[in-house]
Protein backbone atom coordinates (compact mmCIF):
# COMPACT_ATOMS: atom_id res chain seq x y z
CA UNK A 1 0.00 0.00 0.00
CA UNK A 2 1.03 3.58 -0.61
CA UNK A 3 0.83 6.26 2.08
CA UNK A 4 -2.49 7.65 0.84
CA UNK A 5 -4.00 4.16 0.76
CA UNK A 6 -2.85 3.48 4.32
CA UNK A 7 -4.38 6.75 5.46
CA UNK A 8 -7.64 5.84 3.71
CA UNK A 9 -7.68 2.45 5.44
CA UNK A 10 -7.42 4.05 8.88
CA UNK A 11 -9.95 6.77 8.05
CA UNK A 12 -12.48 4.06 7.15
CA UNK A 13 -11.62 2.02 10.23
CA UNK A 14 -12.03 5.04 12.50
CA UNK A 15 -15.53 5.68 11.19
CA UNK A 16 -16.59 2.08 11.80
CA UNK A 17 -15.97 1.81 15.55
CA UNK A 18 -16.89 3.46 18.82
CA UNK A 19 -14.97 4.01 22.00
CA UNK A 20 -16.76 1.11 23.68
CA UNK A 21 -15.58 -1.44 21.10
CA UNK A 22 -13.97 -4.31 23.09
CA UNK A 23 -11.43 -4.76 20.28
CA UNK A 24 -10.08 -1.27 19.53
CA UNK A 25 -9.23 -0.75 15.87
CA UNK A 26 -5.67 0.31 16.66
CA UNK A 27 -5.02 -2.77 18.79
CA UNK A 28 -7.04 -5.75 17.58
CA UNK A 29 -5.34 -7.84 20.25
CA UNK A 30 -6.19 -5.80 23.35
CA UNK A 31 -4.06 -7.97 25.65
CA UNK A 32 -1.00 -7.34 23.50
CA UNK A 33 -1.80 -3.65 23.68
CA UNK A 34 -1.83 -3.82 27.48
CA UNK A 35 1.58 -5.49 27.51
CA UNK A 36 2.97 -2.78 25.24
CA UNK A 37 1.46 -0.08 27.45
CA UNK A 38 2.95 -1.69 30.56
CA UNK A 39 6.49 -1.47 29.18
CA UNK A 40 5.94 2.12 28.04
CA UNK A 41 4.68 3.21 31.45
CA UNK A 42 7.65 1.54 33.13
CA UNK A 43 10.03 3.71 31.09
CA UNK A 44 8.00 6.89 30.57
CA UNK A 45 9.69 9.80 32.39
CA UNK A 46 7.51 11.74 34.83
CA UNK A 47 6.41 15.32 34.21
CA UNK A 48 7.94 15.54 30.74
CA UNK A 49 6.78 16.96 27.43
CA UNK A 50 5.59 13.86 25.56
CA UNK A 51 4.60 13.22 21.94
CA UNK A 52 2.77 10.04 20.95
CA UNK A 53 2.99 9.43 17.21
CA UNK A 54 0.19 7.37 15.70
CA UNK A 55 -1.95 7.92 18.79
CA UNK A 56 -5.08 6.75 16.92
CA UNK A 57 -8.17 6.77 19.12
CA UNK A 58 -6.04 7.60 22.20
CA UNK A 59 -6.66 4.19 23.75
CA UNK A 60 -3.64 4.53 26.05
CA UNK A 61 -3.26 8.31 25.99
CA UNK A 62 -5.01 9.09 29.31
CA UNK A 63 -2.44 6.99 31.18
CA UNK A 64 0.47 8.56 29.30
CA UNK A 65 -0.91 12.08 29.77
CA UNK A 66 -1.44 11.47 33.49
CA UNK A 67 2.31 10.81 33.81
CA UNK A 68 3.27 13.84 31.71
CA UNK A 69 3.50 17.57 32.21
CA UNK A 70 2.32 18.04 28.63
CA UNK A 71 0.97 15.38 26.26
CA UNK A 72 0.71 15.74 22.47
CA UNK A 73 -1.00 13.07 20.37
CA UNK A 74 -0.42 12.99 16.64
CA UNK A 75 -2.18 10.93 14.00
CA UNK A 76 -2.75 11.24 10.25
CA UNK A 77 -6.37 10.09 10.56
CA UNK A 78 -9.12 12.61 11.33
CA UNK A 79 -11.73 9.97 12.19
CA UNK A 80 -9.49 8.39 14.82
CA UNK A 81 -8.56 11.78 16.24
CA UNK A 82 -12.27 12.56 16.66
CA UNK A 83 -12.49 9.47 18.88
CA UNK A 84 -9.30 10.51 20.66
CA UNK A 85 -10.74 13.94 21.45
CA UNK A 86 -13.90 12.38 22.86
CA UNK A 87 -11.89 9.97 25.02
CA UNK A 88 -9.53 12.62 26.39
CA UNK A 89 -12.32 15.17 26.87
CA UNK A 90 -14.04 12.61 29.08
CA UNK A 91 -11.02 12.38 31.36
CA UNK A 92 -10.10 14.84 34.10
CA UNK A 93 -6.94 15.83 32.24
CA UNK A 94 -6.31 19.22 30.65
CA UNK A 95 -2.66 18.88 29.63
CA UNK A 96 -3.24 17.36 26.20
CA UNK A 97 -3.28 18.57 22.59
CA UNK A 98 -4.07 16.56 19.43
CA UNK A 99 -2.53 17.13 16.00
CA UNK A 100 -3.65 15.80 12.61
CA UNK A 101 -0.48 15.19 10.61
CA UNK A 102 1.81 12.46 9.31
CA UNK A 103 4.80 11.36 11.32
CA UNK A 104 6.81 12.32 8.23
CA UNK A 105 5.79 15.94 8.78
CA UNK A 106 6.53 16.26 12.50
CA UNK A 107 9.57 18.44 11.82
CA UNK A 108 7.17 21.00 10.30
CA UNK A 109 4.94 20.93 13.39
CA UNK A 110 7.42 21.10 16.24
CA UNK A 111 10.75 22.71 17.04
CA UNK A 112 13.94 20.59 17.24
CA UNK A 113 14.67 19.25 20.71
CA UNK A 114 11.22 20.15 22.02
CA UNK A 115 10.24 16.79 23.60
CA UNK A 116 11.49 14.78 26.54
CA UNK A 117 9.91 11.57 25.24
CA UNK A 118 8.32 10.26 22.04
CA UNK A 119 6.12 7.13 22.04
CA UNK A 120 5.27 4.80 19.16
CA UNK A 121 3.04 1.74 19.40
CA UNK A 122 3.21 0.24 15.92
CA UNK A 123 3.25 3.60 14.15
CA UNK A 124 6.53 3.15 12.26
CA UNK A 125 5.32 -0.11 10.67
CA UNK A 126 2.45 1.83 9.06
CA UNK A 127 4.98 3.48 6.73
CA UNK A 128 5.26 1.54 3.47
CA UNK A 129 9.04 1.57 2.80
CA UNK A 130 12.27 1.31 4.76
CA UNK A 131 13.21 4.71 3.34
CA UNK A 132 10.06 6.23 4.89
CA UNK A 133 10.72 4.45 8.17
CA UNK A 134 14.32 5.73 8.33
CA UNK A 135 13.11 9.25 7.58
CA UNK A 136 10.61 9.02 10.44
CA UNK A 137 13.27 7.70 12.84
CA UNK A 138 15.59 10.59 12.00
CA UNK A 139 12.83 13.18 12.44
CA UNK A 140 11.83 11.65 15.76
CA UNK A 141 15.42 11.95 16.92
CA UNK A 142 15.59 15.59 15.87
CA UNK A 143 12.57 16.46 18.04
CA UNK A 144 14.04 14.93 21.18
CA UNK A 145 16.23 16.91 23.53
CA UNK A 146 19.69 15.43 24.24
CA UNK A 147 19.11 12.53 26.62
CA UNK A 148 15.43 12.33 25.61
CA UNK A 149 13.72 8.96 25.29
CA UNK A 150 12.13 7.20 22.33
CA UNK A 151 9.83 4.39 23.53
CA UNK A 152 8.61 2.10 20.79
CA UNK A 153 6.93 -1.24 20.28
CA UNK A 154 7.17 -2.28 16.63
CA UNK A 155 7.05 -5.35 14.38
CA UNK A 156 10.08 -7.25 13.05
CA UNK A 157 10.44 -9.77 10.23
CA UNK A 158 12.97 -12.27 11.57
CA UNK A 159 11.05 -13.04 14.74
CA UNK A 160 7.82 -13.43 12.75
CA UNK A 161 9.60 -15.93 10.51
CA UNK A 162 10.70 -17.87 13.61
CA UNK A 163 7.15 -17.97 14.94
CA UNK A 164 5.76 -19.04 11.58
CA UNK A 165 8.33 -21.83 11.37
CA UNK A 166 7.10 -23.18 14.71
CA UNK A 167 3.46 -22.79 13.61
CA UNK A 168 4.26 -24.72 10.43
CA UNK A 169 5.83 -27.53 12.45
CA UNK A 170 2.60 -27.67 14.48
CA UNK A 171 0.40 -27.76 11.38
CA UNK A 172 -0.78 -24.15 11.73
CA UNK A 173 -0.93 -21.64 8.85
CA UNK A 174 1.48 -18.71 8.81
CA UNK A 175 0.66 -15.33 10.29
CA UNK A 176 0.81 -12.84 7.44
CA UNK A 177 1.61 -9.16 7.85
CA UNK A 178 -1.43 -7.07 6.91
CA UNK A 179 -1.04 -5.06 3.72
CA UNK A 180 -0.96 -1.69 5.50
CA UNK A 181 2.02 -2.71 7.66
CA UNK A 182 5.69 -3.17 6.83
CA UNK A 183 7.68 -5.00 9.49
CA UNK A 184 11.32 -4.01 9.88
CA UNK A 185 14.51 -6.03 9.83
CA UNK A 186 15.91 -5.92 13.36
CA UNK A 187 19.53 -5.66 12.24
CA UNK A 188 18.78 -2.74 9.91
CA UNK A 189 16.73 -1.02 12.59
CA UNK A 190 19.36 -1.37 15.32
CA UNK A 191 22.10 -0.17 12.97
CA UNK A 192 20.05 2.87 12.01
CA UNK A 193 19.06 3.95 15.53
CA UNK A 194 22.48 3.07 16.93
CA UNK A 195 23.94 6.12 15.24
CA UNK A 196 21.84 8.50 17.35
CA UNK A 197 20.53 6.47 20.30
CA UNK A 198 21.76 4.14 22.99
CA UNK A 199 19.54 1.22 24.04
CA UNK A 200 18.45 1.71 27.66
CA UNK A 201 16.09 -1.27 27.72
CA UNK A 202 14.96 -4.06 25.42
CA UNK A 203 11.93 -6.23 26.13
CA UNK A 204 10.01 -8.94 24.29
CA UNK A 205 6.58 -10.56 24.40
CA UNK A 206 7.72 -14.08 23.52
CA UNK A 207 5.82 -16.02 26.19
CA UNK A 208 2.59 -14.22 25.39
CA UNK A 209 3.00 -14.73 21.63
CA UNK A 210 3.87 -18.41 22.07
CA UNK A 211 0.79 -19.01 24.21
CA UNK A 212 -1.61 -16.88 22.12
CA UNK A 213 -0.29 -17.70 18.63
CA UNK A 214 0.73 -21.36 19.04
CA UNK A 215 -0.72 -23.00 22.16
CA UNK A 216 -4.13 -21.31 21.95
CA UNK A 217 -4.78 -22.18 18.26
CA UNK A 218 -3.77 -25.79 18.92
CA UNK A 219 -6.00 -25.99 22.01
CA UNK A 220 -9.15 -24.82 20.20
CA UNK A 221 -8.56 -26.51 16.81
CA UNK A 222 -10.52 -26.86 14.53
CA UNK A 223 -12.20 -23.70 15.85
CA UNK A 224 -10.56 -20.36 15.18
CA UNK A 225 -8.75 -18.67 18.10
CA UNK A 226 -10.22 -15.36 19.28
CA UNK A 227 -8.17 -12.41 20.54
CA UNK A 228 -10.57 -11.84 23.44
CA UNK A 229 -10.35 -15.44 24.62
CA UNK A 230 -9.78 -16.08 28.36
CA UNK A 231 -6.73 -18.07 27.21
CA UNK A 232 -5.14 -14.90 25.86
CA UNK A 233 -6.02 -13.00 29.01
CA UNK A 234 -4.35 -15.72 31.06
CA UNK A 235 -1.34 -15.59 28.73
CA UNK A 236 -1.09 -11.83 29.29
CA UNK A 237 -1.17 -12.28 33.07
CA UNK A 238 1.56 -14.92 32.90
CA UNK A 239 3.66 -12.64 30.72
CA UNK A 240 3.27 -9.84 33.26
CA UNK A 241 4.78 -12.12 35.91
CA UNK A 242 7.97 -12.19 33.87
CA UNK A 243 8.83 -12.96 30.28
CA UNK A 244 10.84 -16.09 29.46
CA UNK A 245 13.92 -15.61 27.30
CA UNK A 246 13.44 -19.08 25.84
CA UNK A 247 10.63 -17.56 23.73
CA UNK A 248 12.29 -14.26 22.80
CA UNK A 249 13.06 -15.41 19.24
CA UNK A 250 9.29 -15.76 18.62
CA UNK A 251 8.47 -12.18 19.62
CA UNK A 252 7.69 -10.41 16.38
CA UNK A 253 6.79 -7.33 18.42
CA UNK A 254 9.71 -5.89 20.35
CA UNK A 255 9.98 -3.00 22.80
CA UNK A 256 12.92 -0.59 22.92
CA UNK A 257 13.65 2.26 25.27
CA UNK A 258 16.14 4.40 23.38
CA UNK A 259 18.04 7.38 24.79
CA UNK A 260 19.21 10.13 22.48
CA UNK A 261 22.96 10.52 22.58
CA UNK A 262 24.34 13.85 23.78
Image: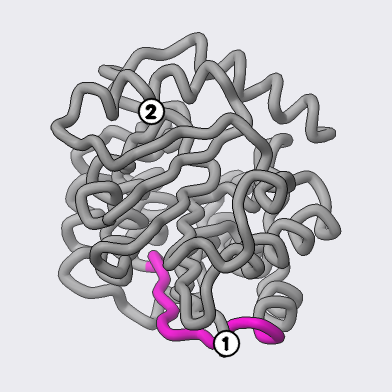
Secondary element at tag 1: loop
Secondary element at tag 2: loop
Range drawn in magenta: 194-206
Residue 42 position within the rendered picture, expressed as x and y whole percent measured from the top left: 25, 69
* Mark in front: 2 vs 1: 1
Q: Is residue 53 above or below residue 226?
A: below
Q: Is residue 122 magenta?
A: no
Q: Is residue 199 magenta?
A: yes
| Left or right of 149 in this view: 40 | left
Residue 189 position within the rendered picture, expressed as x and y whole percent measured from the top left: 69, 73
Q: Who is closer to the viewer here, 73 or 236? A: 73
Q: Earlier in the sequence, mark 2 or mark 1?
A: 2
Q: Who is closer to the viewer here, 95 or 160? A: 95
Tell me the quarter of the image containing the C terminus. bottom right
| Left or right of 171 in this view: 103 | right
Residue occupying the point 70% across, 61% down: 139
Give the residue at the far top of this rendering.
Answer: 16
User: CA separation, marks 2 and 1?
Assistant: 35 Å
Label of residue 261 in the image: 1
Q: Which residue is mark 2?
A: 24
Amino acid sequence: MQLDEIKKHWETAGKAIGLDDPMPVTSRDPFMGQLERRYILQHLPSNGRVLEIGCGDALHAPLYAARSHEYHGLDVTASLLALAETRLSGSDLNNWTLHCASVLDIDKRFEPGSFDCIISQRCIINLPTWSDQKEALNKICSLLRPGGKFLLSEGFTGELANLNQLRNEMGLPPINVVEYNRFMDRGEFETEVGCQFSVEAFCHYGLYLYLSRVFHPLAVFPDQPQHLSPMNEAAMKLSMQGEVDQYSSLSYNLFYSLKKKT
